[in-house]
């Protein structure tokens, strides 16, 4: 459940005042994480950024009380089936090795193998997403999951939750990254974690009972960006956290995709800004996979052969946009009553899907 190296990193992570960069300096100076605790006080003071206050905290980290606290934390994780992993472990996400601000440890529930995938795609976006945005996220996530791509997101409401829903629809591995501890979520969040952990995993850099704070979510976002090989943004305002994630991904050298939308709706402004800044415009999940050279198979429903010109026209129209039944009827030159039976037949065939408000889209 936990390696000796992970225990050493865990001890270091519990030291107040030691973040990713200070930890890295200490490890580089003394050769390994376990060597830190074998040094005299003066050796610690010789490290840049380490003063008397931090030396006191480092000294306390080896005290009997701290050791008991650490053992209690490890025992809690064992009882709750939570893995504690560090960068020295083979299961550590490969993408984080190149991130200077990676955490010292990760707490993980579920299948650690999903973290080793060579095709991890982040899918993020607005919390207050539109119905269309949530639909895109769920469908694209399901499609990518069917192509053996592991979709990672932040389990927030809106686009994140829709993306996780897509992996569950496809019964495939997905990854959720939390901005709080694995045991600190609401009952609904815990249920979602349970479902995601069955085939994929849920992870956090925070101890299991750590409650959410506003400052933890940007930290969560950099983990999503670091673990993924590429990132797709579906809706987001100019000040959206999704843009922070996208820019962090770009700094890590990841491919960034953005889905365009109406210029009349501010929820798309962030994506448009990303495209202006060099993100790749994304209009289809299969195009994203092809851009990444991740082989994509045939899209669900694309093998259906229309039985009439009207069916072909409906499929063509819905392949470009979501449409209200009234608009469809007008474009097809039919009454709503005459069109309804055709739409029902296509819906039963799994070719189209009816949305709230008498709107339709291609499945």
Image (spheres, grey):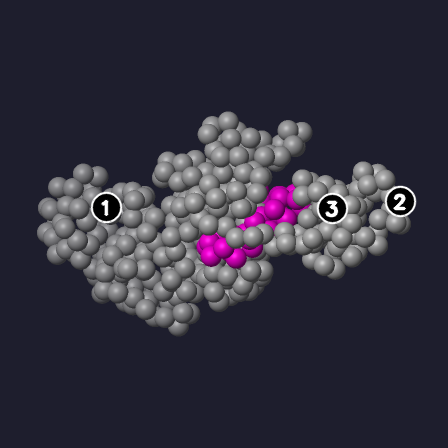
**Residue 1 image point, x, y percent:** 32, 69
Mark 3 lies on residue: 312
Q: Which mark is nearer the camera, 3 or 2? A: 3
Among the two numbered marks 1 and 3 on one chain, the one whose residue lies closer to the N terminus:
1
- Which residue corresponds to the image point at 13% horizontal and 49% vertical from the top-left? 30
- Picture quadrant where residue 335 is located: top right
Residue 164 point in image, percent of width and height: 54, 55
Measure the C-alpha gap from mark 1 to mark 3. Answer: 60 Å
- Whether residue 183 is visible: no
74 horizontally vs 263: left or right: left
| Numbered disc 2: secondary structure | loop
Looking at the image, the residue that sits furthest to the top is 276
- Camera-nearest residue between 322 and 315: 315
Q: Is residue 269 left or right of residue 316?
A: left
**Residue 305 drawn at (x, y percent):** 69, 53
Asked if disc 3 and disc 2 are in contact, CB closer than 8 Å, the reply is: no
Left or right: 186 in relation to 229? right
* Position of residue 246 measured from the top left corner of the image (x, y, whole percent): 46, 38
Determine the secondary structure under disc 1: helix
Please name which of the two marks, 1 or 3, marks the residue nearer to the observer: 3
The residue shown at (76%, 53%) is: 307
Q: Is residue 39 at all visible to an observer of this figure?
A: yes
Q: On residue 335, which mark appears?
A: 2
Q: Which residues are magenta?
A: 124-151
Mark 2 to mark 1 CA distance (whole Å): 69 Å
What residue is disc 1 on? 24
State the separation of the CA atoms marked 3 and 2.
17 Å
């Amino acid at each position: 459940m936990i390696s000796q190296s992970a225990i050493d990193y865990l001890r270091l992570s519990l030291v107040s005042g030691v973040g990713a960069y200070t930890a890295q300096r200490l490890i580089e100076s003394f050769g390994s994480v376990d060597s830190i605790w074998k040094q005299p006080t003066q050796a610690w003071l010789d490290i840049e950024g380490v003063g008397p206050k931090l030396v006191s905290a480092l000294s306390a980290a080896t005290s009997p009380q701290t050791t008991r606290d650490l053992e209690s934390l490890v025992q809690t994780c064992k009882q709750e089936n939570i893995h504690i992993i560090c960068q020295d472990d083979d299961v550590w996400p490969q993408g984080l090795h190149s991130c200077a601000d990676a955490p010292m440890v990760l707490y993980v529930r579920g299948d650690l193998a999903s973290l080793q995938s060579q095709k991890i795609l982040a899918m993020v976006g607005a919390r207050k997403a539109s119905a269309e945005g949530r639909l895109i996220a769920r469908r694209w996530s399901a499609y990518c999951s069917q192509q053996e791509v592991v979709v990672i997101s932040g389990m927030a409401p809106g686009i994140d939750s829709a993306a996780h829903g897509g992996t569950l629809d496809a019964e495939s591995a997905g990854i959720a990254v939390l901005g709080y501890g694995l045991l600190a979520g609401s009952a609904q969040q815990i249920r979602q974690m349970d479902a995601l952990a069955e085939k994929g995993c849920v992870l956090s850099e925070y101890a299991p009972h750590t409650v959410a704070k506003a400052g933890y979510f940007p930290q969560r976002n950099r983990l999503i960006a670091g673990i993924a090989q590429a990132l797709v943004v579906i809706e987001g305002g100019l000040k959206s956290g999704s843009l922070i994630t996208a820019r962090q991904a770009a700094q890590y050298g990841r491919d960034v995709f953005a889905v365009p939308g109406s210029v009349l709706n501010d929820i798309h402004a962030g994506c448009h800004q990303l495209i202006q800044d060099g993100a790749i415009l994304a209009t289809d999940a299969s195009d994203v996979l092809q851009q990444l050279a991740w082989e994509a198979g045939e899209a669900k429903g694309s093998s259906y052969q229309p039985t009439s010109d009207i069916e072909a026209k409906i499929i063509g129209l819905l392949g470009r946009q979501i449409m209200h039944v009234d608009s469809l009827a007008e474009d097809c030159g039919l009454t709503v009553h005459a069109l309804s039976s055709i739409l029902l037949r296509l819906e039963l065939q799994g070719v189209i899907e009816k949305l709230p408000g008498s709107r339709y889209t291609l499945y």
